[in-house]
Image (tube, rainbow, N blue to C red):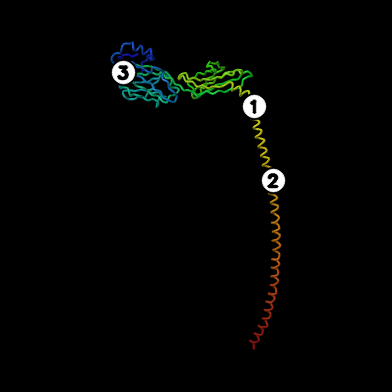
Amino acid sequence: MGEQRSDIPPLGPPAGMQPLCVNFRTLLLLALLPWPGAGQFYVIGPRAPVIGLVGEEAVLSCQLSPSMDAQNMEVKWYRNDPFGLVHHYSTSQVDMEQQMPEYQGRTEFLKENITKGHVALRIRPIQLSDGGEYACFFESSTYYNDATFQVLVTVSGRAPHIHIEPGNKKDFKVTCMSTGWYPEPEVQWRNHQGLHLAPGSETKTMEGSGLFHVESSLTVDKSSRADVSCVVRNTILNVEKEVHVSLADSLFLEDFTWIVWLVVLLVLLVISVTICVLFLRVRKAKGKLQVEHGKLQEEYGKPQEENEKLTAVECKPQEENEKLTAVECKPQEKNEKLTAVECKPQEKNEKLTAVE
């Protein structure tokens, strides 16, 4: 467990050091062992595996026994598989130069009770890759010790749903499906009495996200009218999600499937006939409107032609008046010529008088 050192080794767990898995028996052993000497201590990690839910946070706590101030100690959290530094606290500062890239920006050192030798590391958000074995390591100027523990990452998927499809004449196939689980969940079929039923087939596949998709099928005889349930269980959280199906209702629906289809076809037929009748009526009414419109155009067209003829007749007297006016104007022109002739003798007389 702990070791007294004469030479200060490099920081980190010494080579060949076997991790101590803390559990009830370990604690009992610690109680029976002699109390450590001055400056010596034990590191106590989580007493049970730390459960981290994907997307949430997990707290990895460690403490010294006996209780002592750890402000001036080196405190580290390691991953054992793969090996790497998760977080490093050193001489009242945080040294993160060697931190694994996948943990950068996701760790927080909690030191509210560091004077009592109690510290913790918060990791958030939890990822699927965070599951595994961790070690919590303390080192003073004269002594070092560590404790190992497990981190279990998990997530419960969606509630399962059931698909029923016909098989042969004597049975049908019931398939239960669910997705989004980690790690692989357990799938169970149960009858109405809670007894387990053996599935005909079962598949568990990992999706691109790393979560599991499960399918389990059960073949049921048509003579059976019992109810069955499909249960998908998270083995870490001990959480179950269940879906129930009534085989009697399923068989009832299967027996009357042809009636349902017949009703659907009749409804579609009625709708089609109704649409055709309405279409024909609309088309017929539209034809009547076009005929009536043509008649109205013919009736209103005749008075217009008569008005045009009357206008033409009325214009003829006007033309005759214009001709008469032209004829009346001719005597006036003759009178003007006569006046001009009469004026000539007068001019001659005026000339004679002037000679005399």
Camera-near label (2 vs 3) is 2
- Residue depicted at 48% across the width and 23% down the height: 156
Q: In the visual, does 270 lie left or right of 175?
A: right
> Residue under circle 2?
288
| 332 or 154: nearer the viewer | 154
| 68 or 337: nearer the viewer | 68
- Residue depicted at 62% across the width and 20% down the height: 167
> Residue under circle 1?
259
| 156 or 72: nearer the viewer | 156
Q: Residue furthest bottom?
A: 356
> Residue under circle 3?
67
Amino acid type, label 3: Ser
Q: Earlier in the sequence, mark 1 or mark 3?
A: 3
Dot 2 falls on a residue whose secondary structure is: helix
Amino acid type, label 1: Ile
Q: Earlier in the sequence, mark 2 or mark 1?
A: 1
